[in-house]
Amino acid sequence: MTMQDLTVIAASGIALPDQPFHGRHLISGHWQDSADAATFDRVSPAHGLVVSRSALGGAAEAQAAIAAARAAFDSGVWSRITGKARAALLLRVADLIEANVERIAVLETLESGKPISQSRGEVSGAADLWRYAASLARNITGDSHNTLGPDMLGVILKEPIGVVAVITPWNFPFWILSQKLPFALAAGCTCVVKPSEMTPSSTVMMGELLIEAGLPAGVVNIVLGFGQPVGTTLASHPDVDMVTFTGSTAVGKAISVAASATLKKVALELGGKNPQVIFPDADLDSAADAVTFGIYFNAGECCNSGSRILVHEDIAEAFVAKVTALSRQVAFGDPMNPDTQVGAMISPAHQGKVDAYVKAAVAAGAKVTLGGGALQVPGMGGQFYQPTVVSGVTPEMAIARDEVFGPVLACLTFCSMDEAVALANDAAYGLSAGVWSDSVHTCLDFARRVQAGTIWTNTWMDGFPEMTFGGFKQSGQGREIGRYGLEEFLEIKTVAMRIGRTRPNWVKTR
Ligand code: NAD
């Protein structure tokens, strides 16, 4: 493989900030360093330079943030105000996000390595999540029971669940925060947020916007640092009523275990090994483009990555050739260049893990039709991985089963609908799936039989705040966004009311 075979965007010379961004904890409305003044640095995965320096939180900071969130919740300053007032604040945050897109997007790209055009889209798109959540804040309703007899009325109330710990990953830091935080706030909860140690800064910027919007102190607190001890403290603390987590399945399981001692609610958005099934009667040009998008978007570091395709055997060879040809034209390289479509890998260790999957597949008999190794982008200091297509993959190979989380497409074949469904469901995960066919019957049959939280027919990765999202099997529990996303943050309370002095006495008085 030579670089001439790929579309590589060399270092564009766009000036980077001359000082690292300084992130601090937000606790009870105050920005603060850690008690011991410890910090940690983030090196840009594309440029090899320190781009942020953040306060390194410990158990003490996590506990202080939990106490602030608890006090704010119990005071009613947010949990007991009107939906109208909550909605007004969420709408102000949405406006502020739109006014700050560029500032947030640049830090997001520097910390994550993703293309600047994508960061701009994610940050401005996040404003819509806040607006949608604002609409829900005014529509929290329960049930009434008017058939319990003339002397009884039953009311089912929905109440905020309480203090919510929000733990987020590095791949879509601002977007995933916005899939959770405005919905928790719309419900009336107070929060402690812990962003990934790889990408803390856009969450700090969110904290600045919340203060500017007028959110009362303590309603949202932010603690920067690592899973151990900040995340573990949040997951196990008795004053936290719920943890909402997006990240790896392994950490999701650890959080479930840590949370079990207090039986707090746990909502998990975890990994995926998402199949796209391509039938011969599909629009194969559109399918090939969507497969290319699905595997290289965010360098494949995406829970919804379309990391395995199941292609009907009659068209498999031609289809993989089509995807390989398109893959050569995807612009890889300097993420600060607006033309770049795919940027850097998050860390050298992660890049090594991705490469090991490709090498193991080749050793097991699969064939690399494009890529298959690291890529030195001229003028850049970080780590990049070539767009990689692996064909001849069989279902038992790790590359067909594990979440590789890189720009690596695994191609398998099938010959009947039954086999396609069986292969699609032969995974520990069940996050999303896609089906390509001109027959609505084929699409519906597959959609109803596949075990996945989201199914796309003749498209890939379209999403809307209205359309709820979440996983089957080991891809998670609970749902985000949409109406169900709000429900996650609500507790249900039954109020049984007697009308008049009609209650018969229990004690038989003598
Ligand atoms: P990760 O699980 O390593 O870390 C996620 C967060 O958990 C980070 O903030 C981390 O500091 C924290 N953490 C780590 N150990 C912890 C512990 N023991 N207790 C509490 N918190 C802890 O995940 P990542 O590498 O940041 O993100 C990649 C993973 O996220 C992938 O598996 C991907 O599929 C998944 N993901 C899922 C979705 C979805 O919606 N389903 C979306 C994006 C990413």
Image: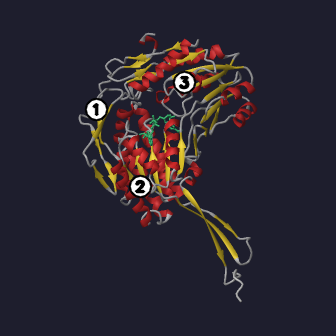
Q: Nearer the viewer, residue 494 or 178?
A: 494
Residue 101 position within the rendered picture, expressed as x and y whole percent measured from the top left: 38, 42
* Type of amino acid under label 1: Val
Figure check: 103 above or below 411:
below
Circles 1 and 3, Cβ within 8 Å, touching? The answer is no
Q: Residue at x 69, y 17 (%)?
A: 313
Q: Badge 1 is on which residue?
A: 50
Categorize mark 2 by other alpha carbons within 10 Å: few (<14), some (14-19), many (20+): some
Q: Residue at x 57, y 49 (%)?
A: 482
| 2 or 1: tag closer to the N-terminus | 1
* Type of amino acid under label 2: Arg
Residue 180 position within the rendered picture, expressed as x and y whole percent measured from the top left: 49, 48
Q: Secondary structure at mark 2?
A: helix
* Type of amino acid under label 3: Thr
Can the viewer see residue 213? yes
Q: Nearer the viewer, residue 435 or 363?
A: 363
Q: Badge 2 is on which residue?
A: 92
Residue 109 position within the rendered picture, expressed as x and y whole percent measured from the top left: 37, 33
CB of residue at label 1: within 8 Å of ligand 1? Answer: no
Q: Nearer the viewer, residue 1 or 363?
A: 363
Can the viewer see residue 367? no
Q: Secondary structure at mark 3?
A: helix
Figure check: 7 above or below 201:
above
Q: Residue at x 43, y 49 (%)?
A: 234
- Which numbered circle lies on residue 292? 3
Mark 1 to mark 3: distance in Å?
32 Å
Image quarter (top left, top right, bottom left or bottom right) of the C terminus: bottom right
